[in-house]
Image (tube, grey):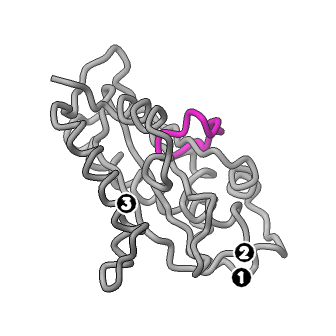
Amino acid sequence: MSVLTQFNDNPGPGHWKAVTKILAYLHGTLDYKLTYGSANSDLVGYSNADRLMLEDRKAISGNAFIIDSGAVTWSSKKQELVLLSMTESEYIAATHTTKETLWLVSLIRQIFSHLDLPMMLYNDNQSAIALAKDQQYHMCTKHIDIRFHFICWVIKEGKIKLVYCPTEEMVANTLTKALPSVRVKNFAHALGLRKD
């Protein structure tokens, strides 16, 4: 939907076809609701960026946080930087997700007074994970604003643990790119959407 909204002023036939698919999806999921309840009540996060950068070379970041088998927060938005590689877009997405992680952990601790750290944050790009864990200056990333290296400090402090998650299991994929119906349904279920 976020990609389609960029063509509101002058939509073409392909855009209308995409809108009908969105409406069909919404109609087909009217009976779904967000549900919670499982043996695992740990908070886990998923961070992702799209693999097909748009014409403006700005990737879409997505994240989702699940506790007790249901999503508690999720986000999808265009990154503000022009990027040179998928590693960079995934790294920046992970940094944005880290900020959301710290806020969510703080909120949960205020309400429930207990949450084990480090919190697991899953990402499907091994290069971005290595860059975040390495905490070294890299010539190939010197153009990335210093604020995006914040994730390195958070990992070093032991507040999050950035863990590899295969792309096929990356729940945040549904927030960053168009996917086949079967995968959308699988990820929706993983986020806690279930039929009445």
Which mark, residue 84?
Answer: 2
Place of residue 181 in the rendered image (x, y in percent of width and height, measured from the top left) = 44, 37
As drawn, the residue found furthest toward the right would be 139
Q: Is residue 157 rendered to the left or right of residue 117?
A: right
Q: Nearer the viewer, residue 64 or 96?
A: 64
In the shown orientation, is residue 83 left or right of residue 187? right
Give the magenta-colored segment's residue range. Answer: 160-172
Q: CA distance from mark 3 to mark 2?
A: 31 Å
Q: Is residue 146 left or right of residue 11?
A: right
Which numbered dot is residue 143? Answer: 1
Q: How many marks?
A: 3
Q: Residues within 10 Å of mark 1 (few under 14, many from 20)?
A: few
Q: Quadrant of residue 81?
A: bottom right
Judge by depth and name the residue closer to the eye, 160 or 12: 12
Which residue is most to the front? 13
Rendered image: mark on residue 17: 3
Name the residue: 36% across, 35% down: 188
Looking at the rendered structure, the secondary structure element under dot 2 is: loop
Q: Depth-wise, is mark 3 or mark 2 nearer the camera? A: 3
- Contact between marks 1 and 2 (CB within 8 A): the answer is yes
Q: Is residue 118 visible?
A: no
Q: Looking at the picture, does residue 39 appear above or below residue 49?
A: above
Residue at figure coordinates x 54%, y 52% from the top left: 48
SS for dot 3: helix
Residue positioned 43% across, 30% down in the render:
186
Task: Spot the residue most to the top.
Answer: 39
CB under 8 Å between callouts 1 and 3?
no
Observer-side mark, 1 or 3, equals 3
Query: Which quadrant is the C terminus positioned in?
Result: top left
Q: Which residue is drawn at the image coordinates 34% and 24% (left, top)? A: 41
